[in-house]
Image (cartoon, rainbow, N blue to C red):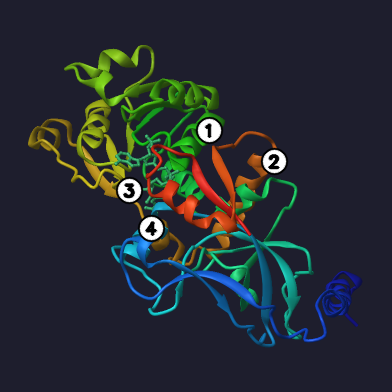
C-alpha cells in the first residue's frame, strides 16, 4: 500500500475533479465562448488586428480550460504581428499575445497536474495566443503561481523579469560591489535589472533616451535603486569614466536600443568587458569601433530568452518565476504598468505602439 504522503495527492485529485465539475457548467468539457484579438496577415498591428468571437473548444482528457485575467502587450508581440520576429504563430487566425495570467476554469478528466478551479496559472514557457478570454491547452503548458501578488505581475513575469535575471547570471561572474551598465533602463527589463542587481549588491549605471519626462523617469529609476541615471545627451563627452566616481568600471553591459545608446554602453565598459544585446528598440544597428576590439578586447554577445527556454530549461524557468514572484511579494521587485480593460484594447495598442508618447507597459485586463 502506498504511504499516506503518496495517497494524499491522488485523493486531492479526485476532490478537485468533483470540484471542477461543480465549478463549470453542464457542458463541463467544453470551454465557454471566447473573444480573441487575432490577425490573418502580417502588417501594422493597428491595421491587421481584430477582435473576434471564438467558438467553444472541446477539452481533451488532459486539457485545462483557463479564463484569462490579464496579458501584456510586449514589443515582441508587436514584432510577431509585423512578421519580423523569428518565431511566429501560423496564419490565418493567429491570436496575439505570448504571456499572461489566467484562472483555472475547468479540467479534463485525466489531468494529473496539481491544479484546481480558481488557481492562477501562467503559460510557462510563454506561448502564443494569450490575448483571449478563454484558452484550452494541455496541462503541461500551465504553471500554477501564487495569487497574492497583483495580477499584472503574474501576467508579466515570464518574459521581462526572467530576461533580466538570466542576463545578470549567464554572461559574467558578478560579485557584490561590481557595476553593470545598461541602456533602455526605463523598460521593464531595465527596471528589473536595476532591482535584481541591487538584491545582489551590484551597482547599476543607467542610460535613458532624451524625451519629455526624462527627468521624472530618472527620479523613478533612482527610487527603484539605480545608482546613476544619465540621458544620452548628458553622455555626449569624451571621458565617460570620470562619471563613474567611486563605482568600478563595469565588466558587463546590456543593450536593448542600438545606435548611439549602444555605443555609450560600450564606452563605459572596462578592458575585456562584455556587451549583451537583447533588443533593438531604436531599429538602429550596433556599431563598434575597431579600436574597442583591439585595445579593449570587448566581447559582443546576444541573449534570446526563447533560445534559453528551448534548451531543456523549462523546469528552471518555473523555479525562477516562483523566485521572481516571491520578490514581488516581498516588495523587492516592482515596475510601472498601466492596467487597461479589454474593451479598450485599441487604446492599449496605440499606447504600446508609442502613439501617445512614452507610456508604461500596457497590461490588458479581461
Ligand atoms: N531577447 C530577449 O529574449 C528579450 C526578452 C524580453 C525583452 N526583450 C526586448 O527588450 C526590450 C525591452 O522590452 P520591455 O518589454 O522591457 O520594454 P517596455 O517595458 O515595453 O519599454 C519599452 C522601452 O523601449 C524604449 N523605447 C521605445 N522606443 C524607443 C526608441 N525609438 N528608441 C529608444 N528607446 C525606445 C522605451 O523608452 P522610453 O521610456 O523612453 O519610452 C522603453 O525603455 C525590447 O526590445 C524587447 O523586445 C528581449
User: CB at mark 3 closer than 8 A to ligand 1?
Assistant: yes
Distance from the alpha carbon under mark 3 to that under mark 1: 19 Å
Where, by quadrant of the figure, is residue 111 drawn? bottom right
Q: Residues within 10 Å of mark 3 (few under 14, many from 20)?
A: some
Residue drawn at x 43%, y 39% is 187
Distance from the alpha carbon under mark 2 to that under mark 4: 29 Å
Return the residue at label 4: 78
> Do residues under tags 2 and 4 come within 8 Å of each other at their CB atoms?
no
The answer to which of marks 4 and 1 sits earlier in the sequence is 4
Return the residue at label 2: 329
> In the rendered view, would you say 289 is above or below 323?
above
Q: Which mark is residue 273?
A: none
Return the residue at label 1: 195
Q: Position of residue 167 (x, y in %)?
A: 41, 45
Q: Looking at the image, in which quadrant does ligand 1 appear?
A: top left
Where, by quadrant of the figure, is residue 30 drawn? bottom right
Determine the secondary structure under disc 1: helix
> In the rendered view, would you say 85 is above or below 40?
above
Q: Looking at the image, how many numbered discs can be counted on the residues?
A: 4
User: Disc 3 or disc 1, which is closer to the eye?
Assistant: 3
Determine the secondary structure under disc 3: loop
Q: Is residue 156 left or right of residue 69?
A: left
Q: Give 254 or 232, whichever is nearer the viewer.
A: 232
> Do residues under tags 3 and 1 come within 8 Å of each other at their CB atoms?
no
The answer to which of marks 3 and 1 sits earlier in the sequence is 1
Distance from the alpha carbon under mark 1 to that under mark 2: 14 Å
> Do residues under tags 3 and 2 come within 8 Å of each other at their CB atoms?
no
> Do residues under tags 4 and 3 come within 8 Å of each other at their CB atoms?
no
Amino acid at each position: 500500500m502506498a504511504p499516506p504522503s503518496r495517497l494524499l495527492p491522488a485523493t486531492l485529485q479526485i476532490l478537485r475533479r468533483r470540484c471542477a465539475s461543480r465549478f463549470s457548467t453542464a457542458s463541463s468539457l467544453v470551454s465557454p465562448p471566447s473573444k480573441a484579438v487575432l490577425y490573418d496577415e502580417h502588417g501594422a498591428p493597428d491595421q491587421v488586428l481584430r477582435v473576434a468571437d471564438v467558438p467553444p473548444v472541446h477539452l481533451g482528457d488532459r486539457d485545462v480550460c483557463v479564463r484569462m485575467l490579464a496579458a501584456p502587450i510586449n514589443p515582441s508581440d508587436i514584432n510577431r504581428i509585423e512578421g519580423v520576429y523569428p518565431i511566429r504563430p501560423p496564419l490565418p487566425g493567429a491570436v496575439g499575445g505570448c504571456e499572461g495570467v489566467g484562472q483555472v476554469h475547468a479540467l479534463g478528466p485525466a489531468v494529473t497536474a496539481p491544479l484546481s478551479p480558481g488557481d492562477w496559472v501562467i503559460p510557462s514557457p510563454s506561448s502564443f495566443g494569450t490575448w483571449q478570454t478563454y484558452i484550452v491547452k494541455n496541462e503541461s503548458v500551465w504553471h500554477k503561481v501564487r495569487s497574492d501578488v497583483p495580477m499584472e505581475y503574474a501576467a508579466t513575469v515570464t518574459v521581462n523579469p526572467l530576461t533580466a535575471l538570466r542576463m545578470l547570471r549567464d554572461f559574467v561572474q558578478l560579485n557584490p560591489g561590481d557595476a553593470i551598465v545598461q541602456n533602455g533602463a526605463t523598460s521593464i527589463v531595465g527596471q528589473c535589472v536595476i532591482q535584481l542587481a541591487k538584491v545582489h549588491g551590484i551597482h547599476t549605471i543607467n542610460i535613458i533616451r532624451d524625451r519629455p519626462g526624462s527627468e521624472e523617469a530618472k527620479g523613478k529609476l533612482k527610487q527603484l535603486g539605480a545608482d546613476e541615471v544619465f540621458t544620452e545627451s548628458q553622455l555626449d563627452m569624451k571621458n565617460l569614466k570620470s562619471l563613474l566616481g567611486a563605482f568600478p568600471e563595469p565588466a558587463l553591459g546590456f543593450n536593448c536600443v542600438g545606435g548611439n545608446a549602444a555605443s555609450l554602453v560600450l564606452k563605459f565598459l572596462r578592458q575585456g568587458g562584455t556587451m549583451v544585446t537583447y533588443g533593438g528598440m531604436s531599429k538602429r544597428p550596433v556599431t563598434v569601433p575597431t579600436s574597442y576590439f583591439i585595445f579593449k578586447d570587448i566581447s559582443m554577445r546576444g541573449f534570446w530568452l526563447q533560445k534559453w527556454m528551448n534548451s531543456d530549461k523549462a523546469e528552471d524557468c518555473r523555479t525562477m518565476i516562483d523566485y521572481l514572484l516571491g520578490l514581488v511579494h516581498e516588495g523587492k521587485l516592482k515596475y510601472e504598468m498601466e492596467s487597461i480593460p479589454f474593451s479598450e484594447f485599441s487604446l492599449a495598442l496605440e499606447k504600446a505602439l508609442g502613439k501617445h508618447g512614452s507610456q508604461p507597459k500596457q497590461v490588458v485586463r479581461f
